[in-house]
């Protein structure tokens, strides 16, 4: 009878103690352009990208990020950086900035 009571209790404790899977971000690329530097981070599922932007003289480990923007693809994120921060003249860039 004791075995019958202990098994369900152990099962409940096991289920409660199993951690949920955490979604991690991964550094995809980093670089410079104009007066700024960036880090591009990808979500664990690869469906979302975060572009973190700093002044080029700031330390990315110590200084606060200047801007964080989310994108659906790495290409859109890097085009955004090139157009608005590196001031490149790409076909993807809007004409009026």
Image (tube, rainbow, N blue to C red):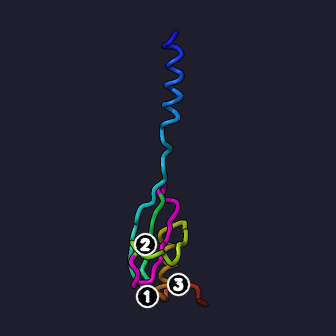
Q: Position of residue 91 (x, y in %)?
A: 52, 84
Query: Crowdedness of circle 2 by 10 Å Cα count: few (<14), some, many (20+)?
Result: some
Would you place residue 40 above or below residue 82 in this image? above
In-image side of 68 versus 26 (left or right): right
Tell me if residue 49 is in the magenta stretch. Answer: yes
**Location of residue 4 with respect to 70 vertically, above or below:** above
Q: Is residue 9 left or right of residue 40?
A: right
Magenta extent: 44-59
Residue labelled with disc 2: 39
Q: CA distance from mark 3 to mark 1?
A: 11 Å
Residue under the point 42% across and 61% down: 26
Task: Answer whether residue 54 is magenta in the image.
Answer: yes
Identify the residue shown where x is 43% and y is 72%.
39
Residue at 40%, 65% (x, y): give it. 27
Most distant residue in the right direction: 96
- Residue 49, position in %: x, y? 50, 66
- In 3D space, how far apart are the residues under numbered discs 3 and 2 (Cα atoms)? 15 Å
Q: Looking at this view, is 8 or 50 the one in front?
A: 8
Q: Which residue occupies the foreground of this view, 9 or 86?
A: 9
Location of residue 71 (image quadrant): bottom right
Pointer 3 and pointer 2: residues touching (CB < 8 Å)? no
Which residue matches tag 1? Answer: 35
Residue occupying the point 50% across, 73% down: 77
**3D distance between C-alphas at marks 1 and 2:** 14 Å
Q: Residues within 10 Å of mark 1 (few under 14, many from 20)?
A: few
Q: Quadrant of the C terminus?
A: bottom right
Question: Looking at the image, is 47 positioned above or below residue 17?
Answer: below
Residue placed under numbered mark 3 in the picture: 84
- The quadrant holding residue 31 is bottom left
Secondary structure, mark 3, is helix
Q: Answer yes or no: do the residues labelled 1 and 2 have beta carbons within 8 Å?
A: no
């Amino acid at each position: 009878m004791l075995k019958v009571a202990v098994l369900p209790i152990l099962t409940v404790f096991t289920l409660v103690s199993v951690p949920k899977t955490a979604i991690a971000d991964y550094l995809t690329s980093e670089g410079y352009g104009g007066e700024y530097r960036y880090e591009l981070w990808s979500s664990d599922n690869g469906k979302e990208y975060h572009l973190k932007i700093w002044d080029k003289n700031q330390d990315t480990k110590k200084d606060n990020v200047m801007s964080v923007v989310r994108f659906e693809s790495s290409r859109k994120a890097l085009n955004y950086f090139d157009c608005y921060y590196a001031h490149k003249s790409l076909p993807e860039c809007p004409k009026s900035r």
